[in-house]
Image (cartoon, helix red, strand yellow):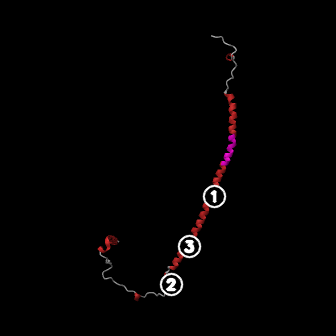
Amino acid sequence: MPAANRSSNAYQLQPAAPPRSKAEETPRNKNKSVKKPARAARVQPIALVLLAFLILLFQISRWVALYGLHNDIKRQTAVLDSLRRENEQTALEIDSLTDASRIERYAKDELGMRKMESSQVVYIQPLQGDSMQRVAKKSAPLSARGILGAFSATVGDALEYLR
């Protein structure tokens, strides 16, 4: 084995740096973590103010919408009241126009009519009781109408029978 050369760096021992403890690592981490909360501390109040502003803006928009609906309700209520008054006036006018004495007066004065006397009324008695008889119409022969005319007449007669 060759003799070791003392001039090489392999045998020059120098003390190694002592291993770092967690206590030494913490100040370095503290510096980094202190910067983040400082930035978060600046952003958080701004975000809260912005959030409060948005909530207030939303609330105001809801109030404006409710005010608009309230105005619509007032307007529609006024229209409904006017229609009800008009309906009552029309009903009163109809009642006054259909009053029997008014109709009689109009017939006498305007139309020159007079009331019917009992001698003008004639009652008749039917010979066969209270019945009715339907007489069939005379129609052209089926051969003169053609096929469609005959079919149409048959369907018409059937519908007439069902009435």
Mark 2, residues whose alpha carbon is within 10 Å: few (<14), some, or many (≥20)?
few
Q: Does dot 2 land on a helix, a strand or a loop?
A: helix
Q: Earlier in the sequence, mark 3 or mark 1?
A: 1
Does residue 47 show up magenta in the picture?
A: yes
Query: Where is the C terminus found, in terms of image quarters?
Result: bottom left
In the image, 46 versus 137, the foreground residue is 137
Residue in the picture at 68% in, 35% down: 33
Label 3 – label 1 distance at C-alpha: 33 Å
Residue with the mark numbered 2: 106
Q: Amino acid at mark 2?
A: Tyr
x, y percentage for residue 20? 67, 26
Which residues are the magenta region?
Answer: 39-50
Residue with the mark numbered 3: 86
Q: Earlier in the sequence, mark 2 or mark 1?
A: 1
Label at residue 96: none
In the image, 8 versus 94, the foreground residue is 8
Q: Is residue 78 left or right of residue 154?
A: right
x, y percentage for residue 108? 49, 87
Q: Amino acid at mark 1?
A: Val
Rendered position, 159 above or below 112: above
